[in-house]
């Protein structure tokens, strides 16, 4: 956005981060190579209004506080966009009203490495949409702004898109139980069956809320719901292809060694040593399921295991997946490929 000639102000509560950006610019490493972008950064105390387009890019745990802090600088024409994981559009709308909120689903990945230094871990598009599904002028302006960053798609059902990522994140949360990349964590057929079981359970919650989950290039809800051997084989193949694509993308930048190898859950547990977003991802699925009487024992157990790691009561390790697999079997999940299931070499 800055390179496209927009005035961009970064706001953060971390003083060292703000000072580093103002002094040296924002250093970005990763899939697009290395670059440093001169930018203006401020703390909340230094912020002035009015604000036009506001992109919230905090962890879900900080959404409400971040919105409350910028609320005094919003006008009737201000737009607030959630560039986050989780069902944050609802949280933002509760703070400032839904009429100021535009939904978004960022699918690319990044990590904060240190003051003034971030890592762009993989390319992917962003979907943006009005909460009521309308195509509006301000939505087109949002699309224009985000298109400066990456491929951006207009959505007439952004809630469905947000829920789709929320559902898929249950599988990603599971990979945080081990100190490994997502590809390594999901390398075995058993572990992929576990991920599918978690997503299938989360899809039942979305169905109960009458949310239409859209399909995407590598994600077809009907395949996750199905127990037909041919559809299971196809789903396993798509999971494998997606992870391979991300891996190939990283290998294009041969001179750079990525620090963030796993999921955001892994990054927080293993590298940052802090609480993850699990409470607002898998945890939110479980809480919404409880309110309407939909059973989610698999996701509840997975989330609790992550919470135990956060509290220092459990270590990150492969035995966690063995324990979760045993629990899933007790719940009636088959984690062994049926005899008639034909698996390609890539997922065998």
Image (tube, rainbow, N blue to C red):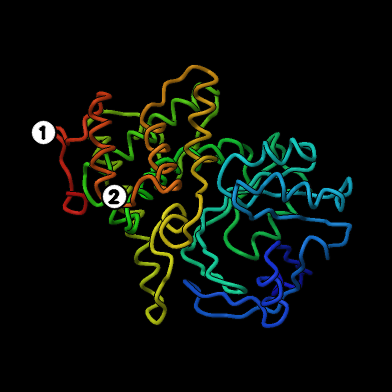
On screen, residue 308 above or below 119:
above
Whichever of labels 2 and 1 marks the residue nearer the N terminus, that label is 2
Q: Residues within 10 Å of mark 1 (few under 14, many from 20)?
A: few
x then y, percent, for residue 143? 68, 54
Q: Quadrant of residue 101?
A: top right
x then y, percent, for residue 131? 69, 37
- Residue at the limit of the structure toward the top, as seen here: 293
Name the element at disc 2: loop
x then y, percent, for residue 96? 80, 40
Q: Quadrant of residue 224?
A: top left
Nearest to the observer: residue 89 or residue 283: 283
Nearest to the observer: residue 21 or residue 132: 21
Residue to which mark 2 is pinned: 186
Question: Residue shown at 70%/55% (left/top)?
Answer: 55
x then y, percent, for residue 232? 26, 36
Describe residue 230's horizontal placement relative to residue 89 as left or right: left
Question: Residue shown at 49%/17% (left/top)?
Answer: 293
- Residue at the limit of the structure toward the left, as seen here: 339
Question: Residue shown at 25%/38% (left/top)?
Answer: 323
Q: Which mark is residue 64?
A: none
Describe residue 170's horizontal placement relative to residue 344 as left or right: right
Q: Which mark is residue 339?
A: 1
Describe residue 187's horizontal placement relative to residue 293 as left or right: left
Name the element at disc 1: loop
Whether pointer 2 and pointer 1 mark residues with C-beta atoms closer than 8 Å, the reply is no
> Distance between the Cα atoms at labels 2 and 1?
21 Å
Residue 217, can we see it? no
Is the N terminus in the top left, top right, bottom left or bottom right quadrant?
bottom right
Q: Residues within 10 Å of mark 2 (few under 14, many from 20)?
A: many
Residue 346, can we see it? yes
Question: Mark 2 or mark 1, which is nearer to you?
Answer: 2
Nearest to the observer: residue 47 or residue 110: 47
């Amino acid at each position: 956005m800055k390179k496209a000639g927009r005035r961009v102000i970064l706001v953060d509560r971390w003083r060292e981060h703000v000072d580093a950006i103002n002094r040296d610019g924002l250093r970005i490493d990763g899939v697009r190579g290395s670059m440093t972008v001169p930018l203006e950064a401020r703390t909340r105390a230094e912020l002035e209004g009015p604000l036009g387009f506001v992109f919230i890019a905090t962890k879900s745990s900080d959404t409400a506080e971040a919105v409350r802090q910028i609320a005094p600088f919003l006008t009737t024409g201000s737009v607030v966009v959630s560039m986050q994981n989780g069902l944050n559009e609802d949280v933002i709308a509760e703070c400032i009203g839904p009429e100021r909120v535009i939904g978004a689903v960022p699918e690319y990945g990044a990590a904060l490495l240190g003051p003034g230094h971030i890592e762009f871990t993989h390319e992917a598009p962003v979907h943006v949409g009005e909460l009521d599904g309308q195509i509006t002028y301000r939505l087109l302006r949002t699309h224009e702004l985000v298109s400066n960053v990456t491929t951006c798609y207009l959505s007439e059902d952004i809630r469905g898109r947000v829920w789709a990522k929320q559902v898929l994140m249950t599988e990603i949360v599971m990979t945080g139980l081990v100190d490994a990349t997502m590809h390594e964590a999901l390398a075995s057929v058993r572990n992929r069956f576990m991920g599918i079981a978690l997503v299938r359970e989360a899809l039942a919650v979305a169905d109960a809320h009458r949310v239409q989950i859209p399909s995407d290039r590598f994600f077809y809800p009907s395949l996750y719901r199905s127990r037909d051997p041919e559809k299971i084989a196809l789903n396993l193949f798509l999971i494998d292809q997606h992870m391979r694509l991300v891996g190939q993308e990283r290998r294009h930048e041969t001179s750079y060694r990525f620090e963030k190898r796993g999921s955001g859950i892994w990054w927080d547990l293993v590298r940052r040593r802090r609480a993850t977003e699990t409470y607002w991802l898998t945890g939110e699925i479980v809480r919404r399921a409880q309110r309407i009487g939909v059973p989610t024992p698999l996701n509840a157990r997975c989330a609790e295991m992550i919470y135990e790691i956060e509290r220092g009561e459990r270590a990150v390790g492969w035995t966690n997946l063995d324990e979760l697999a045993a629990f899933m079997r007790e719940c009636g999940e088959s984690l062994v490929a049926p005899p008639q299931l034909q698996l390609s070499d890539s997922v065998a």
